Image: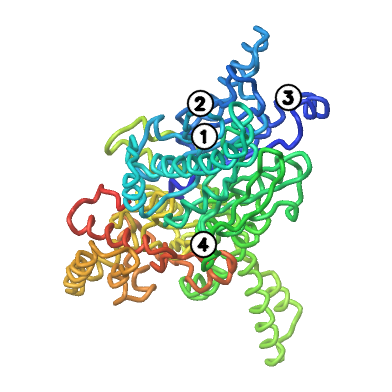
Amino acid sequence: MELIKHECGVAMIRLLKPLEYYQKKYGTSLYGLNKLYLIMEKEHNRGQEAAGIGCVRMDVAPGNEYIFRERAEGADAIQKIFDTVHHQIDDARSQGAAEPFVGEVYMGHLRYSTTGRSGLNYVHPFMRRNNWSSRNMLLCGNFNMTNVDEIFNSITATGQHPRLYADTFILLEQLGHALDRENERLYKIHRAQGLTGLALSHAIARDLNVANMLRRCSPEWDGGYVICGIVGNGDMWAMRDPHGIRPAFYYADDEIVVLASERPVIQTAFDLGVEDVKELKPGEALIVDRDSSWRLEQILPEGKNARCSFERIYFSRGSDADIYRERKELGRLLVEPVLKAVDNDIDRSVLSFIPNTAEVAFYGMVQGFEEYLIKDKIREIEKLAQAGELTDEKVEKVLLRRVRREKVAIKDIKLRTFIAEGASRDDLAAHVYDITYGSVRPDDNLVVIDDSIVRGTTLRQSIIRILDRLHPSRLVIVSSSPQVRFPDCYGIDMSRMGEFIAFKAAVSLLRKRGMENVLEEVYRKCKDQENLPKEEVQNHVKDVYAPFTDEEVAAEIAELLTPPGTRAEVRIVYQSVESMHKAIPENPGDWYFTGNYPTPGGNRLVNKAFINYYEGNSSKRAD
């Protein structure tokens, strides 16, 4: 499998009772902090470059800290953070001081860099400081905006001066400005009523409405997002984009409100059933006010459903009941194209998978083959009956036919290729997987399923070479997802056209057939649209693929990925877009595969990605 750096993970917790309640019931004032840790560890798959947490404690006397943040980089960032926090708490207790990170409101963030920027300055949550509690803010999110330049111009037009040109910094300034306007609105109202000093400050903190802030800012946002915030007064909110591109789930009872990027992490942390955890609707915000009341509020109208299909295929934890069922169905729906690839020869075909993320799709593929084999056995028995040859011996031979499945590849987790360089690194990469010798006969077809084939580098550098050692006559690599042809611009690290093996195959076919002019024409069309408003831009990169069928592109991919000296015939089978939609009907967002972007900014960025490719800026990101 290929590692794709993808969208981040978020977690929000709001305790609805006084801290003493949790101390008495659960034996600790760290109940919220402990639950945050558990959720973040369960979401660790969503971000292994950095992490951060934030906390707000309410009703703290002036002169005492009430807003806390801790961040760290590295794959062990979660552990670093919570070790640091617990040391701080222990130190405070030993000195009889107020405990930091013990509060009613928490947020957590796990980061994968999707913009090429790194360093602690870019690690969420971001914090806005002010002497008035209701003007402080912590911000984190799972998002990528396609129109950062427009938002930047909008806020600089008000006289603001963002420190850095990055979407999170810019959103912090934009939302901070809106928070100031909301404070000023309430200041005028309560000042007119004669309130001053702390009474005025408390009234503003009590009546603050973060929905006003979100309605002011969000119409300018183009992208996929779940954006989360905590105001220093204790208000908490999380908002999802109107197309539902990025996921968010929540649970609430009389003790707690919790939100996370994935349903099963909430189920695990609080021992809940699948029906207890709800999905935040597109364009909707979950808001918890200072007084512990909570509500769902539609901030933007719900747009066309573009919930991310790749989220279900690859990114999310397979322990979610719906995702598990969908991934099995993805495998089952591949039976027909795989049968075609092995010339319908089930008896000489061995089914397996690339450890470990494709295992569930493998179960579905096996199930589909078993269903096909049952029908095939019925046909054979009917033929025997018609020929008057229905003997026990012949029927037994038919019934003993089985779908052959083996675990032919085992990942060697001890092997680390980063210690080597150059050719020696490639040699080590070819041994990342151990194989089960004797599991395949020399005349067999070996069918191996993976969850996706995006760049193909791991296949070419190691997996095909490794599997070829089993000496199959034909090696069929199967992708449970369709061909990834277009870059993502909504928070996943797939933004460069030249990285996609499907794009390389299409370009190779154009050149083989003397159609290089198509590339030049696409480039010209993309350049002609550079200065158009994003709403008028069309995706002309689709023209690169238009001359070819999916099967032609897959055959060229197989040729490009087959290493020299491979003895087996290599074929590559991809899931069709139509079958994918059958397996995942509620998540139709398919821009990776079709180029049908759900927001105008997507078309602009895919054209920009092609321009970068054509001009030789292969390392330059479209976003």
CA gap, disc 2 and disc 3:
27 Å
Q: Residue at x 32, y 61 (%)?
A: 606
Residues marked 4 and 1 touching at CB (< 8 Å): no
* Image x and y of residue 601, in percent: 36, 60
Q: Which mark is nearer the camera, 2 or 3?
A: 2
The residue tagged 3 is: 29
Tag 2 secondary structure: loop
CA gap, disc 4 and disc 2:
37 Å
- Which three-letter amino acid code belongs to the residue tagged 4? His
Assess disc 4: are there few (<14), some (14-19) or many (≥20) residues with their C-alpha within 10 Å of its C-alpha.
many
Assess disc 2: are there few (<14), some (14-19) or many (≥20) residues with their C-alpha within 10 Å of its C-alpha.
few
Q: Which mark is nearer the camera, 4 or 1?
A: 1
Of label 3 and label 1, which has the lower sequence position? 3
Task: Tell me if residue 355 comes above or below residue 230 in the rendering.
Answer: below
The residue tagged 4 is: 243
Task: Tell me if residue 276 comes above or below residue 333 in the rendering.
Answer: above
Q: Residue at x 29, y 34 (%)?
A: 421
Q: Which mark is nearer the camera, 4 or 2?
A: 2
The residue tagged 2 is: 131
Q: Report whether residue 46 is seen.
A: no
- Which three-letter amino acid code belongs to the residue tagged 1? Arg
Residues marked 4 and 2 touching at CB (< 8 Å): no
- Which three-letter amino acid code belongs to the residue tagged 2? Asn
Closer to the camera in the image, 9 or 129 = 129
Task: Please tell me how many numbered marks the rendered image carries.
Answer: 4
Give the left or right position of residue 466, taking residue 323 as reference: left
When asked about the image quadrant of residue 394, the answer is bottom right
Q: Residue at x 66, y 79 (%)?
A: 375
Task: Tell me if residue 177 comes above or below residue 481 in the rendering.
Answer: above
Of label 4 and label 3, which has the lower sequence position? 3
Assess disc 3: are there few (<14), some (14-19) or many (≥20) residues with their C-alpha within 10 Å of its C-alpha.
many
The residue tagged 1 is: 135
